[in-house]
Amino acid sequence: MTDAPRRRRQSPAVYRRRRLAAGLLALLVIGLVVWLVAAPPWRSAPTAQETPAPVESASTAAPAPTSSTSASPSPTATPSTPAGPVECGPSEITVDALSDKAEYAQGENPQLSIRLTNSSATACTMNVGTSAQSFTVTSGSDVWWRSTDCQTEPSDLEVTLAPGQTVSSSAPLTWDRTRSSVGSCGSERPYAPGGGATYHLSVSIGGIPSAGTASFVLR
């Protein structure tokens, strides 16, 4: 009969390592129990009331109120849109009638212009186109010529006049020294007498008349 195999006896070093491992395991178990009692894991999760507020950047963060009365924002004034220039009126505009000469030789046609000045302290707008202009030449009480009698293709030109600004006609209007009328635009018209006769030019623009007249002599 064969003898049963004998169990090999462990060396003393193996027993020492086993005892050391068992001791370390016991220490770990004790430490875990102590940690669970002192700091339970459910206390580390923040509740809904403990959720930290988002951090605002310096450019968007609002200053904290210093007292309960300053919590409500104070009303701020809404900036108003500045009004644009108003339409020029007779109190703002000075209109002058101009002729390029004071005396014209026989056969020489007067060159007539308008000058206007914004005499107010504020800017204003005005239609200075040919549709708003009117020239009238008189001799005494006799009206010899109106620019509107035979005007063709009048145009509008809206401009803004700065305070104190003066503007004049871009090109003068020529008077051909004839008598005008609405019904004689396409026919021959009588010439105004010369020989030293005096004539007066009055103008208006935008319904604002000139303060005076420009006088000239026809030879």
Image (cartoon, rainbow, N blue to C red):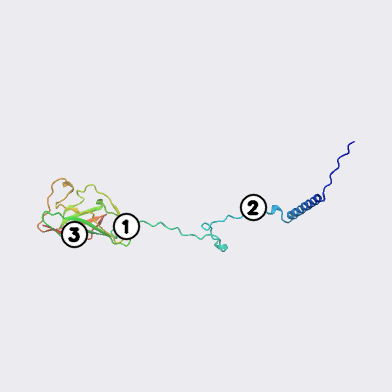
Q: Position of residue 194 (x, y in %)?
A: 10, 56
Which label belongs to residue 124? Answer: 1
Distance from label 1 to label 2 (Cα)? 64 Å
Q: Which residue is mark 3?
A: 214
The numbered mark at residue 41 is none
Amino acid at circle 3? Ala
Residue 92 pos. (x, y %): 29, 60
Looking at the image, the residue that sits furthest to the bottom is: 66
Q: Earlier in the sequence, mark 1 or mark 2?
A: 2
| Secondary structure of the residue carrying numbered label 1 | strand
Left or right for 83, reference 170: right
Disc ID at residue 48:
2
Q: CA distance from mark 1 to mark 3?
A: 26 Å
The residue lying at 21 percent from left, 56 percent from top is: 113
Estimate how packed mark 3 is, as few (under 14), some (14 to 19) or many (20 or more) residues with alpha carbons within 10 Å: many
79 displayed left or right of 128: right
The secondary element bearing badge 2 is classed as helix
Q: Residue furthest top?
A: 1
- Mark 1 crowd level (few <14, some 14–19, many ≥20, 10 Å Cα): many
Image location of residue 32, percent across then percent down: 74, 53
Instruction: Give the residue type at disc 1.
Output: Cys
